[in-house]
Image (cartoon, rainbow, N blue to C red):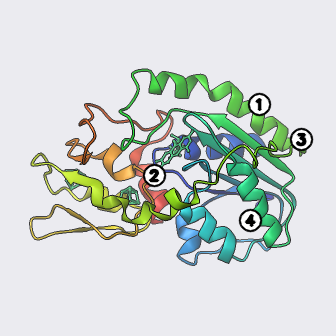
């Protein structure tokens, strides 16, 4: 019987690494992938001491998959509800959006944390040279956040709602943004991108190459993990290297997304 539960979603491992560090600090914690929760898998207990949400910021808000989960899912009871989100540049009002979604379900958000991690959005920029190094450098900050969660410290989201437009139209457009993916001749048809996709948005075409089904989360797992660097974006310079958090493996992410 675990005392704590951490729901997480991660395309390239930053959030998974954060969730794992928090779980390690708390001890006795069930780590629960949100894609599996949306496919109907349920946490093992009806009530926990602490329940948390760990995920990346998308367009200054929550990934669509997280919004769907918070709107639909049956949530276990908790003494302390927390969120720890991570972002590449600016978190916008993601934590405020999360708090509103919980309040709409009659639930409080006791503590809201955010942390800068390497950006992974290949559609907008290439992998930065020092991404892996800055991921490792963020570890001390993750551990500090985890300690505060262990102590059940309260922390309000910053009152930024009035400063940031919600970008909700950009998030609404994400499912069809896979139309911008371009698969190069380097693709070997290995199928590893399809195996990593958290929402089964990829199926092989006649040549075994990926075909995208327009229910994309834009999590970047497929493009960042492709061993042949074959997935690029129309209009973007083809990236020469790819990123995942050095503390997690693609196999762990595959298990998290397809479990
Ligand atoms: C579709 C998409 C939108 C993003 N939007 C933002 C954003 O609005 N602000 C920001 O600072 N980072 C943004 N990022 C960067 C991610 O939040 C950041 O790289 C995060 O740490 C990735 O976590 P993960 O490795 O767990 O997937 C975006 C990334 C993606 C893929
Ligand atoms: S991971 Fe890359 S090489 Fe493998 S099927 Fe997907 S696009 Fe092709
Ligand atoms: S198609 Fe690629 S970017 Fe879209 S949800 Fe699947 S793995 Fe993520």
**Could you say where residue 106 lies in the image, as x and y percent from the top left?**
85, 72
Q: Secondary structure at mark 4?
A: helix
Q: Secondary structure at mark 2?
A: helix
- Choose mark 4 or mark 1, whichever is in front: 4
In the picture, the quarter occupied by the N terminus is bottom right
**Could you say where residue 152 lies in the image, as x and y percent from the top left?**
89, 46
Any part of residue 228 in sight = yes
Q: Secondary structure at mark 1?
A: helix
- Asked if ligand 1 lies within 8 A of label 3, the reply is no
> Total marks drawn?
4
**Could you say where residue 35 lies in the image, as x and y percent from the top left?**
53, 66
Q: Secondary structure at mark 3?
A: loop
Q: Which mark is residue 101?
A: 4
Q: Residue at x 27, y 34 (%)?
A: 239
Query: Which residue carries the number 1 mark?
Result: 144
Q: Which mark is residue 219?
A: none
- Choose mark 4 or mark 2, whichever is in front: 4
> Mark 3 or mark 4: which comes first in sequence?
4
State the separation of the CA atoms marked 3 and 2.
29 Å
* Callouts 4 and 2 close, C-beta under 8 Å: no
**Could you say where residue 56 lies in the image, as x and y percent from the top left?**
58, 47
> Mark 2 or mark 1: which comes first in sequence?
1
Q: Nearer the viewer, residue 238 or 160?
A: 160
Can you say whether 103 is above or below 160 in the image? below
State the separation of the CA atoms marked 3 and 4.
24 Å
State the separation of the CA atoms marked 4 and 1.
26 Å
Q: Residues within 10 Å of mark 2 (few under 14, many from 20)?
A: many
State the separation of the CA atoms marked 3 and 1.
11 Å
Q: Which mark is residue 253?
A: 2
> Mark 3 or mark 2: which comes first in sequence?
3
Q: Which mark is residue 151?
A: 3
> Mark 4 or mark 1: which comes first in sequence?
4
């Amino acid at each position: 019987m675990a005392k704590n539960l951490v729901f997480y979603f991660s395309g390239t491992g930053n959030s998974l690494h954060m969730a794992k560090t928090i779980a390690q600090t708390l001890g006795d914690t069930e780590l629960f992938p949100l894609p599996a929760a949306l496919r109907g898998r349920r946490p093992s207990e009806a009530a926990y001491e602490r329940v948390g949400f760990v995920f990346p910021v998308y367009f200054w808000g929550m990934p669509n998959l997280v919004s769907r989960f918070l709107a639909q899912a049956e949530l276990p009871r908790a003494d302390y509800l927390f969120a720890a989100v991570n972002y590449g540049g600016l978190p916008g009002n993601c934590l405020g959006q999360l708090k509103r979604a919980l309040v709409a379900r009659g639930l409080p958000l006791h503590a809201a944390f955010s942390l800068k991690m390497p950006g992974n959005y290949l559609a907008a920029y290439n992998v930065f040279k020092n991404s892996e190094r800055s991921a490792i450098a963020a570890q001390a900050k993750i551990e500090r956040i985890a300690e505060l969660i262990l102590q059940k410290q309260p922390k309000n989201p910053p009152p930024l709602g009035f400063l940031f437009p919600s970008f909700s139209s950009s998030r609404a457009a994400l499912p069809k943004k896979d139309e911008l993916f371009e698969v190069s001749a380097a693709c070997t048809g290995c199928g590893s991108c399809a195996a990593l996709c958290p929402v089964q948005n990829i199926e092989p075409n006649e040549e075994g190459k990926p075909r995208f089904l327009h229910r994309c989360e834009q999590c970047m797992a497929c493009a960042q993990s492709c061993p042949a660097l074959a997935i690029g974006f129309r209009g973007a310079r083809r990236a020469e290297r790819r990123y995942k958090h050095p503390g997690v493996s693609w196999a762990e992410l595959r298990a998290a997304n397809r479990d």
